[in-house]
Image: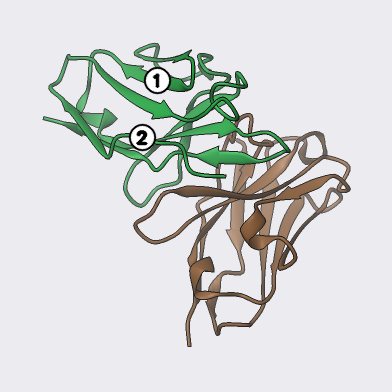
């Protein structure tokens, strides 16, 4: 069974940092683009970042450029999102998803990040 | 990089058909055949229903279909069932390796 499990969310003060992890299983992780998508409370979905299989090519939504870094470890079947200089507007459930954006399938259960003092 | 436009809500009775629209521009929906649709039940992760405008992943009922005309993509659900009640989101490639979602549509099965 293809499965994605996120971890690392929590409460952080504005300006703080957090590192999210996504553990993948049930498929050949190194063969797929991977993405992060977020959803603010009661709001819609927003694509955040994606990364190619090689771990080199990566892209971000403008609002997180320079603050967030996506990375992956194909040996550990894991995807990461390092989030620095966090703002209140970054408060959201962060989902890990297989795919580049052409499709996202499947999605993890999500991890909640709350940025508040 | 503006969100795609979807109706806030649509509704239909069991057995009927409903269509959810997703309007963008020639820089996103109209410019590429990379539109996907996601179903999200409350408190759950989204689920892929349609990709590449009209392709259906295995396991998705053929009651779900997608299409596109100009800058507007559509998701049609025929033979509505109670379990179809959920939020639906469209997503499109917007060039420069950027992906944009719609604001979401709440489907109510009456």
- Which chain is the one coloured green? B
Which scheme is used to colour this image of the protein?
by chain
Residue at 23%, 15% in the rendered image:
B17
Chain A image colour: brown
Q: Is residue B23 left or right of residue A83?
A: left
Q: Position of residue A107 (x, y in %)?
A: 55, 43
Can you identify the residue that label 1 sits on? B74
Q: Position of residue A11 (x, y in %)?
A: 51, 79
The quarter of the rendered structure image containing the N terminus of chain B is top right
Of residues B110 and A15, the one drawn nearer to the viewer in this rendering: A15
What is the chain identity of the residue bearing mark 1? B
Asked if marks 2 and 1 touch (Cβ < 8 Å), the reply is no
Task: Identify whether A92 is placed above or below B43.
Answer: below
Task: Identify whether B64 is placed above or below B98.
Answer: above
Q: Position of residue B102 (x, y in %)?
A: 44, 39
Q: Is residue A45 left or right of residue A7?
A: left
Task: Identify whether A37 is placed above or below B110.
Answer: below
Of residues A85 and A17, the one drawn nearer to the viewer in this rendering: A85
Local crowd at mark 2 within 10 Å, few (<14), some, or many (≥20)? many
Of residues B43 and B100, the one drawn nearer to the viewer in this rendering: B100
Can you identify the residue that label 2 sits on? B6
Q: Is residue B23 left or right of residue B17?
A: right
Could you say which quadrant of the image residue A8 lies in?
bottom right
């Amino acid at each position: 069974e293809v499965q994605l499990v996120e971890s690392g969310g929590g409460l952080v003060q504005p300006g703080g940092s957090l590192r999210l992890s996504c553990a993948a299983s049930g498929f050949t992780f190194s063969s797929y683009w991977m993405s992060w998508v977020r959803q603010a409370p009661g709001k819609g979905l927003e694509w955040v970042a994606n990364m190619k299989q090689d771990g080199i090519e990566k892209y971000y939504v403008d609002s997180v450029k320079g603050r967030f870094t996506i990375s992956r470890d194909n040996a550990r079947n894991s995807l990461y999102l390092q989030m620095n200089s966090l703002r209140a507007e970054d408060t959201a459930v962060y989902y890990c998803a297989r795919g580049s954006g052409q499709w996202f399938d499947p999605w993890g259960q999500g991890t909640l990040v709350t940025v508040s003092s | 990089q503006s969100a795609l436009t979807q109706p806030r809500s649509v509704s239909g009775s069991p057995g009927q058909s409903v269509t959810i629209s997703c309007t963008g521009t020639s820089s996103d929906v109209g410019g590429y055949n990379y539109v996907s649709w996601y179903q999200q039940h409350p408190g759950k992760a989204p689920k892929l229903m349609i990709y590449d405008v009209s392709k259906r992943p295995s396991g998705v009922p053929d009651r779900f279909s997608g299409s596109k005309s100009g800058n507007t993509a559509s998701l049609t659900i025929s033979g509505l069932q109670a379990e179809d009640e959920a939020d639906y989101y469209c997503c499109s490639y917007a060039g420069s390796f950027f992906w944009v979602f719609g604001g979401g549509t709440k489907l109510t099965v009456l």
